[in-house]
Amino acid sequence: MIEPAQRRLANIQTATVEREAIEANLQTVGAIAIDESRQATIAAYIDGRIERLFADYTGVDIKKGDHLAVLYSPQLYAAQVEHVEARRASAVSGALPAVRQAQESLATNTRQRLREFGMTDEQIIDLETSGQAQSRLTIYTHQGGTVIEKLAVEGNYVKAGDPIYRIADLSMVWLMLKLFPEDATRIRFGQRVEAVIQSLPGQTLFGRVAFIDPTVDPKTRTVGVRVELLNEHGRLRPGDYAVARINLPIGPHGKVFDKDLAGKWISPMHPQIIREEAGQCPICGMDLVPTSRYGFAAAPVPQPQALTVPRLAVLLAGGNSIVYVETKPGRFEIRPVTVGPILRDKIVILEGLKAGENVATAGNFLIDSQMQLAGKPSLIDPSRAIAQSKQRKGPLVFEQVAVTPIAGEAGTKLEALYAAYFEAQQALAADKMPPAAAAQALHHAANELASEATLPESSVQLLQDIATKSEHLHHLDLAGARQVFKPISHAVVTLATQVRSEDAHRPFTHFYCPMVAGGGGDWLQPGGELLNPYFGSEMLRCGEKVREFPVPQKPAT
């Protein structure tokens, strides 16, 4: 018993276990990088000497068409003289048609050669108008942006192809993220990402996923994800850090609803291109594809509900997960729990708690240390809590089995629930995870039947328990799935003694294995040989047949 004064001194705080819609959010750190598709190199097209550099320092902003350098080249002068002479020769009247045609062809070839030497059409027209060859060539940029590298200085001799500047258009930048493979699997191309830049605290920017690396980095065991961010006013600087937040669907194949993408068409190369109808991307020319291809729903997706507690409420040590539940004011008891997905600030509880209970969220380590000193169950040895609880020995026993036949749609749903349960049981017996479709069918059937007014109250309670525990069955590993399957199975066995469809055509067999931790484990099978779902191939035939539940008799009409 903790007195109020002691509670205040120890700062013991509690929170209520809630059943709520859950939404997973991923937060990670990345770095701003230059968009590789928006980089360009300004190079010399001909051998020569650099006489003038107009962009004479790194970082200067330039516009498309700006002059960047002047290059002195005797080779260019000779090519210009050749072109001027060829044009004069082709213009001489009185020449034979064949000769004139040859001269015109020569002029065309020399003009093309000047283009290859880096002269623009305007420069060539000026040459043809003036008839005066020039030994100096002004080099213009074909892309606007920022000079990120200056590779030459005035007076340098350069050869054709030698780079002079590197330019990057920083109006759009990349945010480079590294995610664990299990998180990257749940990311969608085109998905919205929130980013807070280190140098712009308090400001949230938005971008979309443009690329998800199809391979895992063998050194870091991470997957690269690239996000495109619009860089208005040049505030985003390559190399700066950013914190990214992404909304993840529950489960690797979950749908994502984004009102900006619902029912739309998107470019497979440029996620910023979103259209109402099919068409082509104005940037790359590729055909737009429906956003549904990337896992986006056309309508809002209902979020699954689950029991959640604050992350601070759960104490973890090795394979142990416990919380301290306040049973009465000032009185706490240890409660082993089975945890599901860990969200940003909450943990999903699959088993061990009920909605409305209060759990300690601060001061729980102090409570735990006092439990250890008193020799009571604690985080280090929660098995004492199990040992102290009254454990059932032997299989589930029912004083009488009075099965109520259920007609209509409710009866059909009942048989669908049993079928989904059997599919999960057979998968576990084969050392496989319960199929996602079976786990979801079990959850949905139990959830819908729990609201059926025609079912007994005791059956409704069992169905609510099945719905709660089966919701995340397919998200766990094999050991976790078997652990959660036990309370599901016990509820299904009990349910089968109470209600079946009036159209049921096969009996159920009740089996029991005494080797399952915590008092043994029960399960049902639709006949056949014993297949132990708790141990699989390790002890596939371990267990005993308890009894057979016959097919219920249809009511007399």
Image (cartoon, rainbow, N blue to C red):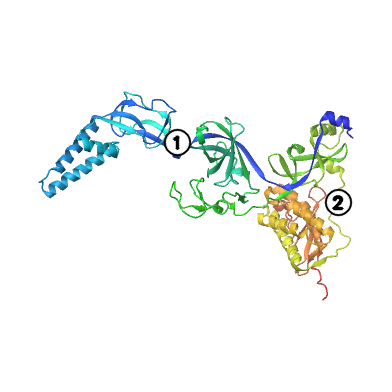
CB under 8 Å between discs 1 and 2: no
On residue 180, the disc is none
**Nearer the observer, 18 or 1:** 18
* Left or right of 481 in this view: 74: left
Q: The C terminus appears in which quarter of the rendering?
A: bottom right
Q: Amino acid at mark 1?
A: Asp
Rendered view: 355 above or below 324: below
Rendered view: 312 above or below 441: above
Residue at image coords 46%, 38%:
36
- Residue 527 seen in this snapshot: no
* Left or right of 476 in this view: 553: right
* Left or right of 84 in this view: 484: right
Q: Position of residue 525 (x, y in %)?
A: 75, 61
On residue 169, the disc is 1
Q: Position of residue 381 (x, y in %)?
A: 80, 37
Q: Quadrant of residue 299?
A: bottom right
Q: Residues within 10 Å of mark 1 (few under 14, many from 20)?
A: many
Q: The N terminus appears in which quarter of the rendering?
A: top right
Residue at image coords 38%, 30%:
165
Q: Secondary structure at mark 2?
A: loop
Residue at image coords 82%, 55%:
461
Per the model, the C-alpha gap separating discs 1 and 2 is 73 Å
Query: Residue farthest to the top?
Result: 155
Q: Amino acid at mark 2?
A: Lys
**Nearer the observer, 552 or 396:** 552
* Left or right of 157 in this view: 405: right
Q: Return the residue at label 2.
A: 393
Rendered view: 483 above or below 422: above
Q: Position of residue 168 (x, y in %)?
A: 44, 34
Q: Secondary structure at mark 1?
A: loop
Q: Quadrant of residue 246?
A: top right
Q: Position of residue 310 (x, y in %)?
A: 74, 39
